[in-house]
Image (spheres, rainbow, N blue to C red):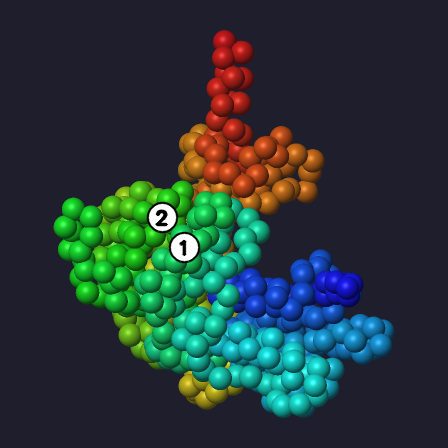
Amino acid sequence: MSEPKPPKGLFIKTYGCQANVYDSERMRDVLAPLGYTPVDSAEAADLVVLNTCHIREKATEKVFSELGRLKDMKQLSGGTMRIAVAGCVAQAEGEEIMRRQPAVDMVVGPQSYHRLPEMIARLSRQTGDVLEVDFAAEEKFDALPKSRQVSGPSAFLAVQEGCDKFCTFCVVPYTRGAEFSRSADAIMAEARELASKGVREIVLIGQNVNAWHGASPAIGGGGGAWRPPEWRLGDLIRHVAQVGFERIRYMTSHPRDMSDDLIEAHRDVETLSPFLHLPVQAGSDRILKAMNRQHTAADYLRTIERVRKARPDIAFASDFIVGFPGEGDRDFDDTLALVKAVGFAQAYSFKYSPRPGTPAAGMQLQVEEAVKEERLARLQALINEQSQAFNTATVGRKLPVLFSRVGKHAKQVLGYSPYMQSVHVENGAHLFGRIAEIEIVGASMTSLSGREGTTAMMSEEASA
């Protein structure tokens, strides 16, 4: 009888968005039947995967810098370590990666990682191509293992891929392909499986998640209720809520796709978090048009007003780009005015940087770097002021907090509120993996401190 083969170490370094986090988790599922098990460092791995993101500035060069470090490790391993580059940089720069860094064994795009076992087999036989960058989202989801490994109380569930919006600054349509919605049947099956494994929070994700649509699994239902033949995201959320999760979120959304059914879901579905990340990018109609956002600042503000009317306690986050080509002082002032009008709990802001192959990269009137720096500092100061005010307003409240990480100190546990605020509690190790009612006792710009509600009540009774 032959001895069982020892497990092979797998280390995946994930860059960028929640879609990449989901893809990395599914890569682990795909590779598990081949004997690969996760390890904590590249040094301990037989296979290292860099799951890359092309959104941020100098993304490609950061990947090559990391590959240089891995090349040295591979040499020390005697050449046995395998290196794969996955994700959006792989999709956009695959041939360049293979040319510039011979230590790379495989390059696989975000719609092709289900082929990793086949690629590894070809590599071991030294036959065939080791570059896979096809756009086959439907094939990918059909080929992924039905069962998922779960490592915490929260899980991403990809419902939509790709983008048809073609914002002039963005590479996503070129690296993720056209918009594709998974079937409602497949999504509901995966949701039920995650719930059966103890997942308490489900996060529905996609590049434009609120563009999701799909055929209803069945017309009719309990009590003779009728459902439309095609669901939108709001319909899907209502059905996911029936699976039994304690918290539901979705991200990332486009303002154009905030439909009535989705806004009504915020009103009606109690477990849907009162938090919406809705990127706007700029407050100037002139710049929004140049970005091909296909909405105005007034459109965005009307959407915010409609969502707030449906769910008065909701909080908003957004994304902003400063220094887009042609942005003048008045355009930037319009962005500041929009931020003041909304009042964000959080927002992410970046200097514009050209992405090769996008229309904006060739636009005239590129803004000077010093101007971008100054505007970014002013915008971030305003956003930080709003974040601090929002966090401070939660002091004294009791919030349900999902605890998903251990802290730096003994018995400290970290979690996040329904508004995606980071919360830490001392002596709370017993809370890990749970959603617990926490009294907020302190706030900074970036986090909250809290104590368990029952502990606080006992202390008050003792002092009385």
Query: Which residue is denoted by mark 2 in the rendering?
Result: 243
Extreme-front residue of the structure: 1
Label 1 belongs to which residue?
Answer: 191
Instruction: Please state which amino acid type lies under the numbered disc 2.
Output: Val
| Vertical order, 221 against 1 (above or below) | above
Report the side of 249 relative to 74 (left or right): left
Determine if residue 181 is in view. Answer: yes
Instruction: Write the residue at 60% across / 39% down.
Output: 413
Circles 2 and 1 in contact, beta carbons < 8 Å: yes
Residue at 76 percent across and 74 percent down: it is 81
Q: Nearer the viewer, residue 74 or 163?
A: 74
Res 290 label? none
Q: CA distance from mark 2 to mark 1?
A: 7 Å
- Give the vertical position of 74 relative to 159 (above or below): below
Q: Is residue 220 above or below residue 115?
A: above
How far across and down, in percent of the image, does residue 441 sit?
Answer: 51, 31
State the residue at coordinates (19%, 60%).
219
